[in-house]
Image (cartoon, rainbow, N blue to C red):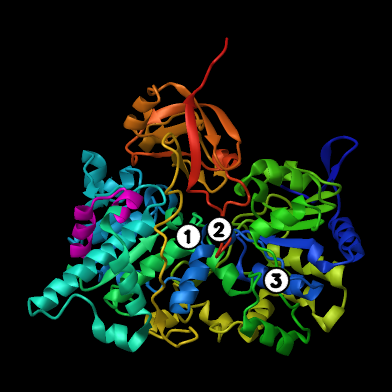
Amino acid sequence: LTHPMAYDAATDTYVAISWDEAFMRIATVMNALPDPNMVEFYASGRASNEAAFLYQLFARAYGTNNFPDCSNMCHEATSVGLAEALGLGKASVSLDDFDHTDAIFSIGHNPGTNHPRMMATLRNVSKRGAPIVVFNPMKERALERFTAPQDAVEMVTGASTPIASTYLQLKVGGDVAALKGVMKALLEKDVADLVAGGPGLLDRDFIAQHTTGFEDLAADLGNTEWTDIENASGLSRADLESAADIYARATSVICCYGMGVTQHSHGTAAVQQISNLLLLRGNIGRPGAGICPLRGHSNVQGDRTVGIDEKTPAHLRTNIKKVFGFDVPEGIGHNAVEAMAAMADGRSKVLIALGGNLAVAMPDMTTCFKAMRALDLCVNIATKPNRSHLLVGKETLLLPCLGRTERDIQASGEQAVTVEDTVSMVHASRGKLAPPSDQVRSEPWIVALMAKAVLGDRYGIDWEAFAADYDCIRDAIEQVIPGFEGYNERIKTPGGFRLPVATAERTWKTPSGKAAFKVHDALGSLTDLDADALTLTTVRSHDQFNTTIYGHDDRYRGVFGRRDVVFMNTADMDARGLVTGDHADIESLSSGEVLKSFAVFAHDIARGCVAAYYPEANVLIPLAAHDTRSGTPSYKSVPVRIRKAVRHG
């Protein structure tokens, strides 16, 4: 995108407009609304800390806490689950911890495709001889072995480094049951060790000093039958006992996990079972140990830190009042699912999208596409066009913004922006490339000038000063957000600086002041399906990042030139009379939607489970299918029925 554009219904095209006209149109619509809660402020995790802070300040000054964001679709279960259990919804580990860990439990993620930079870390852990226990329904090449591009010998000879020392192919959605099984086995082995005169396998001093709820957890595990655990997890008791042995032998353990854990109706429960497992042996807050949720977008964590949150934290409410002089709106705003539902039924009339491809990323595309087309105004801030931009309402604008690699020159000179990574490190970057045109503007500039157009001089906020010099934005962040003391100086440090991580210091910001064991009676979701039903999980291809498809190949899974694919266990294929190359219809048992004539590929995946690509398979997932605790959509536990397609012609 090279210049601001507005959709013209008469010609069915976007036409160029000026920035002044774009802001005037936005202000006209927003200031005519009877209720500020009719606006949804969507944020993608690619926005910088500086842009995200201004964005939440604009929205709250306008009068709403509606902040649907991409975190709602991926790791909201982490933000909710870990905050309740540990007092902080972030990773407790640093990168250095991976150099000292004695074992890694990798649960529900495929780093070769989704977190490729992590492969070097896992390779180093493997080469040290530390076990890596993988829980994943699909066999994935990168989780089995890795050929390092930086290793000349491996590249020339085709050699590789083994990654998983133990690979447990649990059922899709079987993580809660599997983790319960590991913990149940650990407690049984602990009792046996005590009876034999040993010290036991649990860290009882840590449990007594730092936790609450252990007795309730132990009772729940004792009351859970092994047969139920095996049925729900798809793993044998022997496999889970073996994993418990590895866990017990390791002094320090890191648990890494991805969206295979969070994107279920039981996502929060699954996250808290991971924290339960770590707490049993004091594996949080010491070198080489901790919890590590793996996030995708470059600043999805930083956006939340600086205020993109529909549930306004107390410190944010207090400090905005102190610094900017206005009261933050009361109540909880909309998350992504709630925002789309409000747009669909007409309660919300305006969407501002700070990046992203919202309608395509969400479940239930049929509903979401209709919702976008019904808007009075949709403002898209983006570097390039995407499918959501074609869903035009009464008025739709495209505002071109700089990419992170492009030079950002404002009135005070060249600017830097910052992001926060998954281990709470804050880094600054300056783009070096020339922008594609002189009409492209930075995200902070766009947000600040849009706020100025809508709000005018309300509350005396100097939006133009923020746009002119990002040091001013960082000064404001320092005043409002804890942990950013000396922000402008500290970003000059090579490698950045780390925000405070209370859990790493064994400080628990919970009501009790201690970490909490969380009990969940259920063993997961979709445990009572009909005999011919299967559980579908959505996955990404190797040539894909989120909704951006760079190519139609998925070479490590043997797919080339297409994405209309369903991966199946050969036994499930045999039961339905299918072979590789056949085409099948996939019917959602939740919504009734059908994906027709998808190519069947045999794959090493747990029996009773199938996989298809995101976002193509999103149409199968109803908007109402989500984790009730966090609102995270159930992209990875979709009940389906698969039948051989009837092909005509």
Secondary structure under tag 2 reads: loop
Q: Which residues are magenta?
A: 228-246
Q: Are marks 1 and 2 in contact (CB under 8 Å)?
A: yes
> Which corner quadrant of the image does residue 25 belong to?
bottom right
Residue at 72%, 62% in the rendered image: 41
Secondary structure under tag 1 reads: helix
In the image, taking residue 172 as reference, residue 320 lies left or right, namely right
Going from N to C along the chain, the mark reached first, 1 or 3, is 3
Q: For mark 2, what is the residue? A: 632
In the image, taking residue 42 as reference, residue 35 lies left or right, namely right
The image shows residue 550 at horizontal and vertical percentages of 53, 40
Q: For mark 3, what is the residue? A: 56
Residue 247 showing in the rendered view:
no
Residue 267 image label: 1
Query: 132 or 494, which is in the foreground?
Result: 132
Q: Is residue 216 above or below residue 69?
A: below
> Which class describes the residues within 10 Å of circle 1: few (<14), some (14-19), or many (20+)?
many
Disc 1 to disc 2, how far (Cα)? 7 Å
Going from N to C along the chain, the mark reached first, 1 or 2, is 1
Q: Is residue 234 magenta?
A: yes
